[in-house]
Image (cartoon, rainbow, N blue to C red):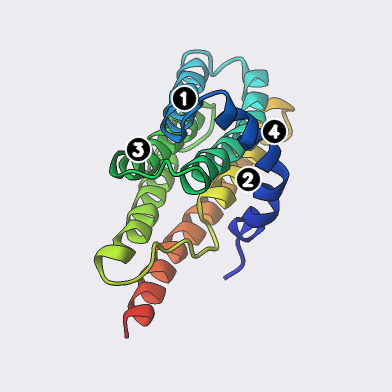
Amino acid sequence: MASIYQLKPRFQALLRPAVQRLHDRGVTANQVTVAAALLSVLLGLLLAVLPHLTWLFILVPVWMLLRMALNAVDGMLAREFGQQSTLGAYLNELCDVIADAALYLPFALLAGVSPTLIVLVVLSATFSEYAGVMGPLAGASRRYDGPMGKSDRAFAFGVLGTGVAFGVLNGAWINGLLLVILALSLYTLYNRVRQGLAETR
């Protein structure tokens, strides 16, 4: 199933010189992981406190792009410079789920947006990531199947944030797009379980 995640190798190639410089300065993969999560939570809190300042939602696509870069950087530091660890594996998965929730939930405070839909999207995103993590426990690989993986959700909410900031998306449009994200997230959950099961046969 097509996913933005498939562009990751090219993205990593562009980041490799910067990753080398970070390693030379003593930056670790776990530090990058935790920093990205903390900044995501801080941005989420800012948007939750000031949802009436809709122009602030332009920070969502900007940060989503930077966060995707940081997510690639921490993985490259871990794999290419011998920084892989059990703690790093826990931090990588937990911080992603926490950051996603922090960045998505503030949209529920916008006028006309259904809080129920936002919560369902957050839950479906969490469950689909959990299904991916379950792969190794079931004898398969970590599943990253789409169509609504982490990178795809980041793109989708970046579009929503841009639309809110420029006033081109009202509550009804946002709710409609959330329904699409929810449906694709549920299919992603199904797809990851299905592909994991197929891999173990």
The reply to whether callout 4 and callout 3 are in contact (CB within 8 Å) is no
Amino acid type indicated by mark 1: Ala
Q: Secondary structure at mark 1?
A: helix
Give the mark, 4 or 3, whose residue is nearer the N terminus.
3
The reply to whether callout 1 and callout 4 are in contact (CB within 8 Å) is no
The reply to whether callout 2 and callout 3 are in contact (CB within 8 Å) is no
**For residue 39, above or below residue 9:** above
Image point (41%, 75%), residue name: 195
Residue 3: x and y, percent?
60, 61
Amino acid type indicated by mark 4: Thr
Q: Secondary structure at mark 2?
A: helix
Which residue is under mark 2?
Answer: 155
Which residue is under mark 3?
Answer: 91
Q: CA distance from mark 2 to mark 1?
A: 21 Å
Q: Name the residue furthest bottom.
A: 201
Label 3: few (<14), some (14–19) or many (≥20) C-alpha neighbours in 10 Å: some
Q: Which mark is residue 35?
A: 1
Image point (47%, 61%), residue name: 144
User: Which image quarter holds the C terminus?
Assistant: bottom left
Q: Which mark is residue 101?
A: none
Q: Pick the residue in front: 1 or 69.
A: 69
Q: Nearer the viewer, mark 4 or mark 2?
A: 2
The reply to whether callout 4 and callout 2 are in contact (CB within 8 Å) is no
Q: Pick the residue in front: 169 or 43.
A: 43
Picture quadrant of residue 51? top right
Amino acid type indicated by mark 2: Phe
Amino acid type indicated by mark 3: Leu
Q: Nearer the viewer, mark 2 or mark 3?
A: 3
